Amino acid sequence: ISQRFNKILLCVPLEKKDYQDVLYINKSIELLEKDGCMILILPQPFLFLEKYKDVRKKIISTCSVESVITIHNKKLLLEYYGYISILIIKKKNQAEKIYMTDSFHMSDSEKWFSNYKNKENGFFVESRDIYNRLDPNFYNPEHKKARLLIQNKNTEKNKKYTDEFFNKNIELL
């Protein structure tokens, strides 16, 4: 396909074994024209799993991550991967701040869309502070102390385990 698109909506089911999901995301980035907008509807683990690190780096290096929204709604629960996230990117230089929110148990789609549109009930993250992952739970200001512990050099050697622990047990910290 040689045509470029100004808007792309991509619903990506993450694959357990092969990397077709990564191919879809990479191709969609390639097909997005300059200043175009893409909305990716993804299983939440895309935002932090190690196997998607390279595609996250590509997104961060070639696009502007505008918003990351995680929706904790049992009606939208995915059988294998849990909750969904919405990643809104634009093909331009990275904005200074990224709006993030964890829409815990918000069942009213109009309400969480309004929150996104008005940048309410969420928080902003300096784009320069983004490292290797995009999940709002990790960057939530309420979890800053735990995040700093995870980013500590002594912790870095156990990063795989601490990242997994962090995502499963943040409520305990």
Image (cartoon, rainbow, N blue to C red):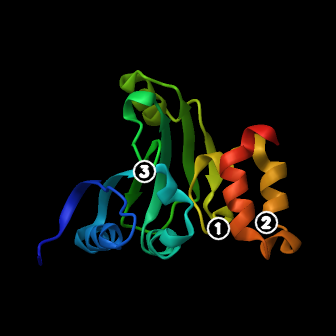
Neighbour class for label 2 at 10 Å: few (<14), some, many (≥20)? some
The amino acid at mark 2 is Gln
Kindly identify the residue that appears in the image at 39 percent across and 42 percent down.
Answer: 78
Image coordinates for residue 2, horizontal then vertical, percent: 12, 78
> Of tags 1 and 2, which is closer to the observer?
2
- Label 1 belongs to which residue? 131
Circle 1 — which element?
Answer: loop
C-alpha distance separating marks 1 and 3: 19 Å
Q: In this view, does 139 lie to the left or right of 98?
A: right
Q: In this view, does 54 lie above or below 11?
A: below
Image coordinates for residue 90, horizontal then vertical, percent: 37, 60
The amino acid at mark 3 is Pro
Task: Locate residue 140: give its quadrant.
Answer: top right
The amino acid at mark 1 is Tyr
Q: Is residue 49 left or right of residue 87?
A: right
C-alpha distance separating marks 2 and 3: 24 Å
Q: Give the farthest residue toward the right.
A: 154
Nearer-the-camera pick, 152 or 7: 152
Q: Which sits earlier in the primary sequence, circle 1 or circle 3?
A: 3
Kindly identify the residue that appears in the image at 60 percent across and 47 percent down.
Answer: 136
- Please tell me the numbered disc located at residue 151: 2
C-alpha distance separating marks 1 and 2: 9 Å
> Of tags 1 and 3, which is closer to the observer?
3
Kindly identify the residue that appears in the image at 48 percent across and 69 percent down.
Answer: 52
- Label 3 belongs to which residue? 43
State which quarter of the image contains the C terminus. Answer: top right
Nearer-the-camera pick, 170 or 135: 170
Asked if marks 1 and 2 touch (Cβ < 8 Å), the reply is yes
Image coordinates for residue 10, horizontal then vertical, percent: 27, 55
Nearer-the-camera pick, 83 or 106: 83
- Please tell me the numbered disc located at residue 74: none
